[in-house]
Image (spheres, coloured by chain):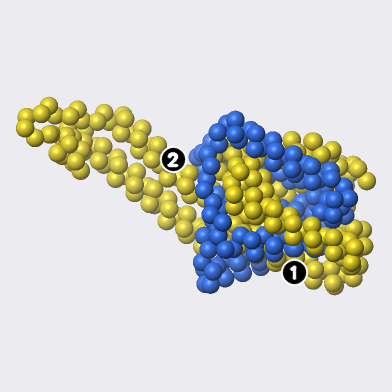
């Protein structure tokens, strides 16, 4: 039965995925969030375009302010600060390069508050499929079948119609529940618990507890 | 790596690695999953808990920014529904993708269910609950 990885290899694998993603992008890795955005792609794309325009506008405004400051030797928005009254020495106009750097930083800051681009989240879901396919084929587990395996047949149901019903209802509960709770086993469980966020620890404890309870019912009762 | 292209590459790497790891741990195997949740076999449980432990230590050392997260009224009911759904269908949102990739064709039904549930939740949330659930996948 144990052609699967030992526990420590799995732990290192999952930890590496989460840590690498967080360090490179400064974001949470969340599969249910990716589903949510990809499934609402029409609306999300509209929001994304709007956000692009807003960040562009903000950058444009800052760039204009910098150019004006360069030309007139002071920031037009705060003239009193540039030329203090009672013969004080005029404040040095800001150096244009500094302004430009600040503009780029502002853009980065604004962009990191926005969700990851829609296309990249679709790519995440597709990559999970390819990664899973590589794992199944290289380990010799790949096997096209119309059932969910012996475990499902023994524990839940052997009837194909019932199976479809159970999987669909289970899927609806998973989709609805993860979005209501604001995350799933990757967003709350790995990224959130890793950051010791109270909401993620509560959510993980509750969904794990519920799954344990229902699994015991499936194992012992049904 | 915070540009659009950088995030795309990071997502592709994360997806490939996550699919490969989840598949090889055995999360896509319903029997293994039930044995984990009933504590008959601690292997997958330790893989998950071990990963969280490593992440906690590394994030603390790297001083990863803590984002605030409010425990709104949807967290506990949502988590109960999710746990129940996971136990009966064997799918957290990533697992059915790995199941399909391993050849379990009925997992497409689970994916369809997840799609319907996700739509329903956003519809119900904008209409009735109005929780600020945006905490994941950002």
Q: Quadrant of residue A194?
A: top right
User: Which chain gets the blue colouring?
Assistant: B
User: Where is residue B132 shown, x and y percent of the image?
Assistant: 52, 60
Chain A pictured colour: yellow
Q: Quadrant of residue A104?
A: top left
Specify the subunit that label 1 lies on: A
Q: Are marks 2 and 1 on the same chain?
A: yes
Q: Height in image: B84 above or below B37?
A: below
Callout 1: helix, strand or loop? helix
Viewer can see residue B32: no
Query: What residue is drawn where x is 32% and y is 44%?
Result: A60
**Image quarter in which the C terminus of chain A is found:** bottom right
Viewer can see residue B48: yes
Q: Is residue A154 left or right of residue A51?
A: right
Residue A169, label in figure: 1
Q: Is residue A119 left or right of residue A213?
A: left
In space, the residues marked 2 and 1 are separated at their CA atoms by: 41 Å
Query: What residue is drawn where x is 12% and y is 27%?
Result: A89
Residue with the mark numbered 2: A108
Circle 1 packing at 10 Å, graded few (<14), some (14-19), many (20+), is many
């Amino acid at each position: 039965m144990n052609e699967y990885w030992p526990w420590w290899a799995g732990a290192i694998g999952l930890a590496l995925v989460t840590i690498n993603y967080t360090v490179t992008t400064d974001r949470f890795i969340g599969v249910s969030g990716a589903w949510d955005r990809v499934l609402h792609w029409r609306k999300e794309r509209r929001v994304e375009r709007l956000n692009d325009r807003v960040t562009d506008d903000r950058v444009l405004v800052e760039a204009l302010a910098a150019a004006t400051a360069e030309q007139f030797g002071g920031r037009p928005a705060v003239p009193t600060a540039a030329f203090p009254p009672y013969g004080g020495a005029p404040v040095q106009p800001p150096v244009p390069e500094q302004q430009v750097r600040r503009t780029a930083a502002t853009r980065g800051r604004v962009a990191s508050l926005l969700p990851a681009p829609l296309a990249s989240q679709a790519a995440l879901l597709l990559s999970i499929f390819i990664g899973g396919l590589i794992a199944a084929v290289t380990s010799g587990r790949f096997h096209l079948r119309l059932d969910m395996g012996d475990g499902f047949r023994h524990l839940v149901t052997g009837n194909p119609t019932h199976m479809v019903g159970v999987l669909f209802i289970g899927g609806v509960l998973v989709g609805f529940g993860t979005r209501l709770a604001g995350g799933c086993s990757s967003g709350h469980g790995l990224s959130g618990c890793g950051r010791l966020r109270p909401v993620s620890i509560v959510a993980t404890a509750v969904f794990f507890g519920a799954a344990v309870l229902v699994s015991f019912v499936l194992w012992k009762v049904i | 790596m915070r540009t659009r292209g950088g995030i795309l590459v990071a997502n592709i790497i994360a997806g490939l690695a996550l699919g490969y790891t989840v598949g090889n741990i055995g999360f896509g195997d319903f029997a293994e999953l039930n044995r984990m949740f009933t504590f008959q076999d601690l292997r997958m449980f330790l893989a998950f808990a071990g990963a969280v432990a490593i992440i906690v230590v590394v994030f603390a050392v790297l001083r990863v920014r803590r984002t605030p997260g409010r425990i709104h009224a949807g967290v506990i009911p949502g988590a109960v529904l999710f746990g129940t759904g996971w136990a009966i269908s064997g799918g957290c949102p990533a697992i059915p993708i790995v199941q399909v990739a391993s050849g379990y064709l009925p997992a497409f039904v689970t994916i369809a269910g997840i799609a319907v549930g996700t739509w329903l939740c956003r519809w119900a949330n904008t209409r009735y609950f109005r929780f600020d659930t945006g905490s994941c996948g950002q």
